[in-house]
Image: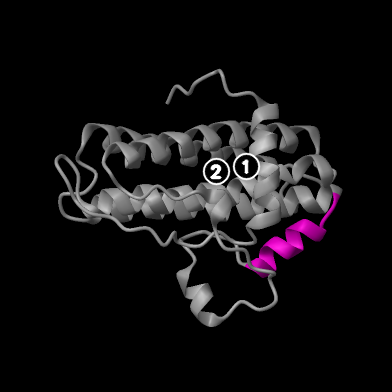
Amino acid sequence: MKRPRSTFVTACLLVSLPLATQIGTAQAPAATANGGTGFVVADAQFMQGMIGHHAQALVMAAWAPTHGASARVALLCRKIMISQHDEIVMMQNWLKDRNQSAPDPSAMPAHDGMNMSMADHAMLMPGMLTPEQLKQLDQAKDTAFDRLLLTGMIQHHEGALKMVADLFATPSAGQGSEIFRYATDVDADQRAEIDRMQQMLNSSPGSKSP
């Protein structure tokens, strides 16, 4: 999927760093969704949920400069920040164009990682890191951060693949040209990044792989 080149890394940093202070774990947005011409409720819910999902990835990626990430992990994080920030804007516009509630990631409720109830855990979207996992990542540095970031981001991306699969498994969902193209692009892009991150993890210091 070709993405706008006008979004710079510095702009993404300015957007995502405030999110890191507000979002411990982004939850499924409390947003209303109604069907309309050319789309169904599941389409709007997919876009709303994916905004929250992407928001957590921005938080994770924004830690790379301050946690001693290696050059290749830092580059990966910059790419994720650019692509997923742009996708959040696109999804918000898609929702607004259809008179649907468009979640604001910066307004999502924060968790301190210590007082999260079982009900909160149940609300996590597929692949989302728990507050405990995020706390562990935030406390890691250098090589340990690299490995936890890659492991967590693989888990996160696999959750996005499930969200796409669930969309297409819902009758009549994912059939509009824009959402079909976006969802299939998410599937292809996330699979490619999972493969890349797994290779990086296998070759990182401390790996048991040959």
**Residue 152: image x %, image y %?**
63, 55
Location of residue 177 (image quadrant):
top left
Q: Which residue is mark 2?
A: 194
Q: Quadrant of the N terminus?
A: top left
Cα separation, mark 1 vs mark 2, equals 5 Å
* Residue at x 32%, y 58% (from the top left corner): 32
Q: Is residue 139 magenta?
A: yes
State the image quarter where residue 17 is shown. top right
* 178 falls in the magenta region: no
Q: Is residue 135 visible?
A: yes
Front-most of residues 84 and 203:
84
Q: Which residues are magenta?
A: 131-141
As displayed, is residue 193 above or below residue 147? above
Q: Residue at x 39, y 51 (%)?
A: 48
Q: Mark 2: which amino acid?
A: Ile
Which class describes the residues within 10 Å of circle 2: few (<14), some (14-19), or many (20+)?
some
Q: Position of residue 26 (x, y in %)?
A: 55, 59
110 over 168 or under it: above or below: below
Q: Mark 1 near mark 2, Cβ–Cβ under 8 Å?
A: yes
- Residue found at x 70% / y 28%: 10
Residue 75 locus on image (x, y percent): 71, 31
Q: Residue at x 26, y 54 (%)?
A: 42
Secondary structure mainly formed by the magenta segment: helix
Q: Which mark is residue 197?
A: 1
* Left or right: 210, with 41 as reference point: right
Residue furthest top in the image: 5
Badge 1 element? helix
